[in-house]
Image: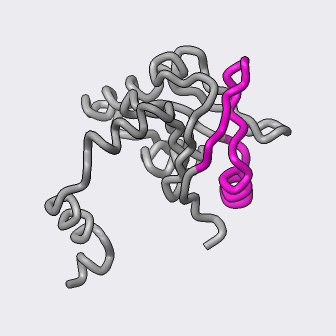
Amino acid sequence: MGNIILGSSSARLDKSGRLKIPEKFRAAIEEQYGKDLFVTSLSDDAVHIYPLPVWLELTGITHEGVNQFNQSVQSFQVRVSHMGSVNQIDLKGRVLISPQLRQKVRLDGEVEVLGITNHLQVWNKEHLVKTIEANPLNAEDWENIARLSPRGRNE
């Protein structure tokens, strides 16, 4: 259970745009996946930081490659690669977030880092609160979540 990345933590970006990954997340990432990361944005609301092995598994990118002739796959790759970059956790536990990505997601100074099972999301704190408040979960959401859970699929 120690390698699951869950919860949230406040953090700061330094003047160079480096995020000091909160210790509880950094330790879990390095122990299970190593220091290589893929930093991108999938939604323009948050920066997504994936351990590189997780990203490669999720996207199906292997030495054989993904289906390069599928237009949806190509569009996805263009979107995530446009501002995405492969980085490493440095000796001080930091990862660089590019200026373009910081600007797109409105990150500056104080941020909120969320652990989402196997990756991190980095949010502008004010935008995160507004997004949560503007999108409350309703009964249909809870039913969909229950159906997706292993228990919900078996029942």
Chosen colour scheme: one colour
The segment highlighted magenta reads: 9-36
Residue 106 is situated, as x and y percent measured from the top left of the image, at 48, 21
12 or 69: nearer the viewer: 12
Image quarter of residue 150: bottom left
User: Residue at 50% of width from left, 35% of height from top?
Assistant: 125
Residue 37 is situated, as x and y percent measured from the top left of the image, at 63, 40
Is 49 left or right of 87, judged from the image as shown?
left
Image quarter of residue 2: bottom right
130 or 3: nearer the viewer: 130
Is residue 134 inside the magenta stretch? Answer: no
User: Residue at 64% of width from left, 65% of height from top?
Assistant: 3
Is 32 left or right of 84, judged from the image as shown?
right
How many numbered circles are shown? 0
Residue 136 is situated, as x and y percent measured from the top left of the image, at 25, 50
Residue 40 is situated, as x and y percent measured from the top left of the image, at 50, 31
Check the image and report above or below for 1 versus 48. Answer: below
Is residue 10 inside the magenta stretch? Answer: yes
Check the image and report above or below for 98 versus 144. Answer: above
Please identify the quadrant where the N terminus is shown: bottom right
Check the image and report above or below for 102 versus 33. Answer: above
Image quarter of residue 154: bottom left
